[in-house]
C-alpha cells in the first residue's frame, strides 16, 4: 500500500494523531461506528480500524512508514492482520494438524497390530473438527471486518489529503474539522 501526500511528514503525522481514538473509548463507545486506534512515531506508524463494541481479532491493521518526498511525503506500508493474529492462527492450526497426524499414526499402529476398530479412527477426526470450526470463525471474522478495511483505507487517505492537493473528492472543510 502506497499513498502520496503534498503535505510534509510532520503535517501528516499530526493529522493522523489528531484523528486517532483511544483504545478504551473505541472499545466501549456507546455511539457505535468505526474508529481508528494505533501509534504514530517519528517515521513509523501502526493503525487498526475497529467497530465500537465489537471484538474481532481479524480487524485490519496497517503498518508502515512516512517518507519525505520532493513534493511532500508518502506513506508506504502493509495492510493486513495483526502479527499476533497471524501467529496465533498458524500455531492453532499447526497444533491441531500435528495432533491429527499423531492420532492417525497411533490408529495405524493399532490397526497393524489388529487392535484398532472404527472408533479409533473416528477419534482422529476430532482435531479436524477443531480446524473446521476455527476456519469457520476466521471466515466470519474476516467477513465482518471487510467494512473496517475499507474504512481504514479511506481514513488514512483522508489524512494524507490537503486543500491544494488536487485530489478529486476532497472537501476543504475537512481540514478545519481536524
Image: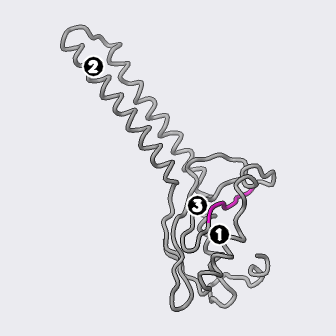
- Badge 1, how many Cα within 10 Å: few under 14, some, many 20+? some
Q: Indicate the position of residue 77 as horizontal and vertical percent values.
A: 49, 69
Q: Is residue 36 magenta?
A: yes
Contact between marks 1 and 3 (CB within 8 A): the answer is no
Q: Residue at x 54, y 76 (%)?
A: 66
- Left or right, residue 94 beside residue 89: left
Quarter of the rendering containing residue 116: top left
Which label number is shown at residue 149? 3
Residue 5 lies, in percent from the top left, at 58, 83
- SS assignment at label 1: helix
Q: Earlier in the sequence, mark 2 or mark 3?
A: 2
Q: From the viewer's perspective, is 17 left or right of 78? A: right
Q: Earlier in the sequence, mark 1 or mark 3?
A: 3
Please provide the residue range marked out in magenta: 33-39
Which label sits on residue 106?
A: 2
Q: CA distance from mark 2 to mark 3?
A: 44 Å
Name the quarter where the C terminus is drawn.
bottom right
Question: What residue is rendered at 32% in x and 13% in y?
Answer: 118
How far is mark 1 from mark 2, CA to CA?
53 Å
Which residue is farthest front? 42
Disc 1 target residue = 155
Amino acid at each position: 500500500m502506497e499513498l502520496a501526500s503534498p503535505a510534509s511528514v510532520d503535517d501528516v503525522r499530526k493529522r493522523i494523531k489528531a484523528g486517532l481514538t483511544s483504545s478504551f473509548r473505541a472499545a466501549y463507545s456507546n455511539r457505535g461506528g468505526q474508529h481508528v486506534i494505533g501509534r504514530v512515531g517519528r517515521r513509523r506508524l501502526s493503525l487498526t480500524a475497529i467497530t465500537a463494541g465489537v471484538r474481532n481479532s481479524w480487524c485490519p491493521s496497517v503498518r508502515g512508514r512516512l517518507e519525505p518526498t520532493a513534493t511532500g511525503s508518502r506513506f508506504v506500508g502493509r495492510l493486513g492482520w495483526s502479527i499476533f493474529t497471524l501467529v496465533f492462527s498458524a500455531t492453532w492450526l499447526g497444533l491441531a494438524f500435528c495432533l491429527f497426524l499423531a492420532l492417525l499414526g497411533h490408529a495405524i499402529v493399532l490397526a497393524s497390530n489388529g487392535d484398532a476398530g472404527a472408533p479409533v479412527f473416528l477419534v482422529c477426526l476430532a482435531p479436524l473438527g477443531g480446524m473446521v470450526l476455527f476456519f469457520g470463525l476466521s471466515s466470519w471474522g474476516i467477513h465482518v471486518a471487510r467494512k473496517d478495511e475499507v474504512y481504514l483505507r479511506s481514513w488514512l487517505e483522508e489524512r494524507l489529503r490537503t486543500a491544494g492537493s488536487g485530489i478529486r473528492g476532497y472537501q476543504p472543510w475537512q481540514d478545519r474539522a481536524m
